[in-house]
Amino acid sequence: MEERTDRDGGTGRVAGLLLAAGGGRRLGGRPKALLPHRGRPLVEHAARVLREGGCAPVYVVLGAARDRVRETAGLEGCVVLDNPEWEEGMGSSLRVGLRALAGDATGAEGVVVALVDQPGVGARAVARVREACAGPASLAAAAYGGRRGHPVLLGSAHWEGVAADARGDRGARRYLRQHAARLALVECADVADQADIDTPADLHRLA
């Protein structure tokens, strides 16, 4: 099911895709989208980061506790998508998002894919990766000390291939590895921290 909360923000050359469906199994079943960050649900912060980084429209894929997320998070201006197969892993959410983008008349040549559980990745990192888009064949990723991380830019020519290969929790990992010769790395270590929130020991990263 797709809900368009607002499309008045216009369409941009590079869209944003936020993967926010995880159930937080290693967090004792606390959905990551609902973790509090700066007084609001983490998903709200992450969606705003994509917008402030210049991505439009912003797609948000929900799964665990999706009804509660819709009720509590301010996602106005986003295209909100449900992933009923979220328990299969991140790959299923990536497929949902890319297929929605491919079927939509956004005019986007690429999409910046971000993860909800990386609060240290802000708008400056998103903007750097977005600016690497040079057309539908573009492929880029944020780098941290030269090592590939998130967010990732997928030109529209890659959407079908990435969606076909996205399984389990690997997302686009194997596709990016197979196309490493074409992948541009955008150093972001000076403006972002890509540490994930996976376990209770990581919750200190939330403000």
Image (cartoon, grey):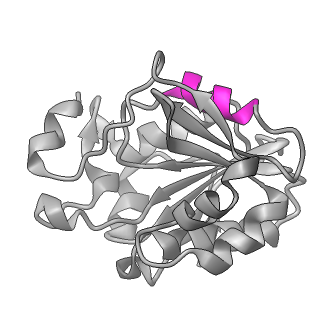
**Of 90 and 16, which appears nearest the observer?**
90
Which residue appears farthest toward the top when viewing the image? 190
| Quadrant of the drawing holding the C terminus | top left
**Of 167 and 122, which appears nearest the observer?**
167
Residue 126 lies within the magenta run? yes
Work out whether 86 lies above or below 46: below
Rendering quarter of residue 89:
bottom left
Work out whether 193 lies above or below 152: above
Residue 89 lies within the magenta run? no
Q: State which region is magenta.
A: 122-131
Dominant secondary structure, magenta: helix
Is residue 53 in sight in this rendering? no
Position of residue 205 in the picture relative to residue 43 (left or right): left
- Residue 178 percent across, percent down from the top left: 65, 63
- Residue 46 percent across, percent down from the top left: 46, 41
**Of 42 and 99, which appears nearest the observer?**
99
Q: Residue at x 41, y 70 (%)?
A: 169
- Residue 14 percent across, percent down from the top left: 78, 43
Is residue 182 in sight in this rendering? yes
Work out whether 58 lies above or below 23: above
Position of residue 197 in the picture relative to residue 157 (left or right): left
Rendering quarter of residue 123:
top right
Position of residue 140 in the picture relative to residue 1 (left or right): right
Position of residue 77 in the picture relative to residue 194 (left or right): right
Q: Residue at x 80, y 39 (%)?
A: 133
